[in-house]
Amino acid sequence: TDTLLLLGTPMFYPDKKFLGLRYVLSSRTSDDGGKTWRNYKEIEYHSHDWWYEYPHVLFSGDFVHMAYRAIELRPDERWSGDFVRMARVHLGYNRLPLIWLLE
């Protein structure tokens, strides 16, 4: 189709380390080549416990398969100097109906 799918972490703060927090993995769609975006959907959200990043997508029939890095942030080490190295890193996965992303 001519529809674009955008996945990302929309919490952008230019003055913060990593340019923002990655507690939300969300999507939007565009039917006009990216001029406007609609259908905001939160796919994953965990306040301060998980980060989501580097999403990948596979379209298969009526479904969208999403894989992404999910980082479990340990409260006692969350903002230490090397928290990514000390965090537990997982592979996140979602299988969603394509129509849900387009509604």
Image (cartoon, helix red, strand yellow):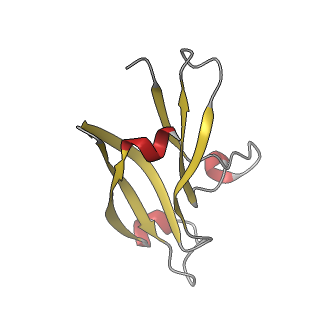
Residue drawn 54% across the image and 78% down it: 77
Q: Quadrant of the N terminus?
A: top left
Q: How many numbered marks have been drawn onto this rendered protein structure?
A: 0
Residue drawn 54% across the image and 74% down it: 49
Q: Can you give x and y, in whole percent of width and height, for residue 26 in the image?
A: 54, 49
Furthest toward the bottom, the residue is 76
Furthest toward the right, the residue is 15
- Residue 89 vertical placement versus 20 (above, below): below
Q: Is residue 43 left or right of residue 1?
A: right
Q: Is residue 14 left or right of residue 78?
A: right
- Residue 15 vertical placement versus 70 (above, below): above
Q: Can you give x and y, in whole percent of width and height, for residue 53 in the image?
A: 45, 51
Residue drawn 57% across the image and 15% down it: 32
The quarter of the displayed image where residue 46 is located = bottom right
Viewer-nearest residue: 44 or 77: 44
Q: Can you give x and y, in whole percent of width and height, for residue 6 in the image?
A: 50, 34
- Residue 100 vertical placement versus 32 (above, below): below
Q: Can you give x and y, in whole percent of width and height, for residue 10 in the image?
A: 63, 46
Residue drawn 59% across the image and 40% down it: 39
Furthest toward the left, the residue is 60
Viewer-nearest residue: 44 or 54: 44
